[in-house]
Image (spheres, rainbow, N blue to C red):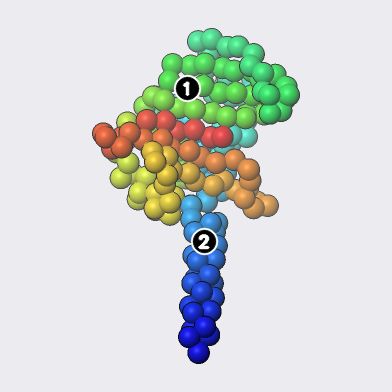
């Protein structure tokens, strides 16, 4: 009888642990937004239905202006060259005429939602908590991720918000 009770407790503990781990890794652990629901722009431009993430290199430069400098970086993962554009407070990387990454480190750029909400570097982290509550709840260290999706579903690109836990301010907004 004692062996049966111990075995039952072990089984129950194992099932509970597996269930908890599966739930903690579910897609609902972060928010997900459609590419058509936001844009990343120079501050003051407002929401645009032609998302910066989907722009060609030339359209990106038209929207953001000429970069202060540029270089060619090599991606070891893709084994290909990327064009790296550097602005004051922003950087963009393109490969094969497609945006690979975009990083804002200045309040001169922001993420604008189609509903009019926006967030930029220097905003309090409480902005993230209200705009992306699941991502905020699932944050790790000083980062919160928001999954991106298109009409076919989730894509292999995320919004990443980094913040300073001491000041409680957003320090970086990027797409990776």
Mark 1, Cα crowd under 10 Å, few <14 / some 14-19 / many 20+, is many
Q: Which residue ends up furthest to the front in the rendered image? A: 2
**Distance Cα–Cα, label 2 vs label 1:** 37 Å
* Marking on residue 21: 2
Mark 2, Cα crowd under 10 Å, few <14 / some 14-19 / many 20+, is few
Q: Residue at x 53, y 70 (%)?
A: 14
What kind of element bears circle 1?
strand
Observer-side mark, 2 or 1, equals 2
Indicate the position of residue 155 as horizontal and vertical percent values.
Answer: 63, 46
- Is 164 above or below relative to 85? below
* Marking on residue 42: none
Indicate the position of residue 169 as horizontal and vertical percent values.
Answer: 31, 35
Label whose residue precedes the other's in the sequence (2 or 1): 2
| Quadrant, the C terminus | top right
Indicate the position of residue 141 as horizontal and vertical percent values.
Answer: 39, 41
- Is 26 above or below relative to 136? below
Regarding residue 149, the answer to whether it shows in the image is yes
Q: Residue at x 48, y 16 (%)?
A: 87
Image-based side of 64 in relation to 72, left or right = left
Image-based side of 8 in relation to 54, left or right = left
What kind of element bears circle 2?
helix
- Is 116 above or below relative to 13? above
Q: In terms of depth relative to the viewer, which is nearer, 21 or 157?
A: 21
**In terms of image quadrants, where is residue 118?**
top left
Q: In terms of depth relative to the viewer, which is nearer, 130 or 3?
A: 3
Image-based side of 35 in relation to 137, left or right = right
Indicate the position of residue 153 as horizontal and vertical percent values.
Answer: 64, 53
**In terms of image quadrants, where is residue 69?**
top right
Regarding residue 97, the answer to whether it shows in the image is no
Q: Residue at x 73, y 22 (%)?
A: 80
Q: Mark 1 points at which residue?
A: 90
């Amino acid at each position: 009888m004692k062996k049966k009770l111990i075995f039952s407790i072990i089984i129950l503990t194992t099932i509970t642990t597996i269930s908890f781990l599966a739930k903690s890794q579910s897609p609902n652990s972060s928010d997900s937004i459609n590419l058509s629901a936001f844009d990343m722009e120079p501050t003051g431009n407002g929401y645009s239905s032609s998302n910066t993430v989907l722009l060609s290199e030339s359209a990106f430069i038209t929207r953001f202006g000429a970069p202060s400098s540029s270089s060619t970086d090599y991606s070891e993962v893709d084994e290909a060259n990327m064009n790296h554009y550097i602005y004051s407070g922003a950087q963009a990387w393109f490969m094969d005429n497609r945006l690979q990454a975009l990083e804002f480190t200045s309040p001169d750029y922001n993420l604008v939602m189609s509903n009019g909400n926006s967030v930029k570097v220097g905003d309090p982290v409480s902005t993230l908590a209200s705009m992306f509550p699941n991502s905020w709840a699932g944050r790790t260290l000083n980062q919160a991720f928001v999954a991106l999706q298109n009409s076919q579903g989730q894509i292999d690109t995320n919004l990443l918000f980094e913040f300073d836990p001491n000041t409680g301010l957003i320090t970086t907004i990027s797409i990776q």
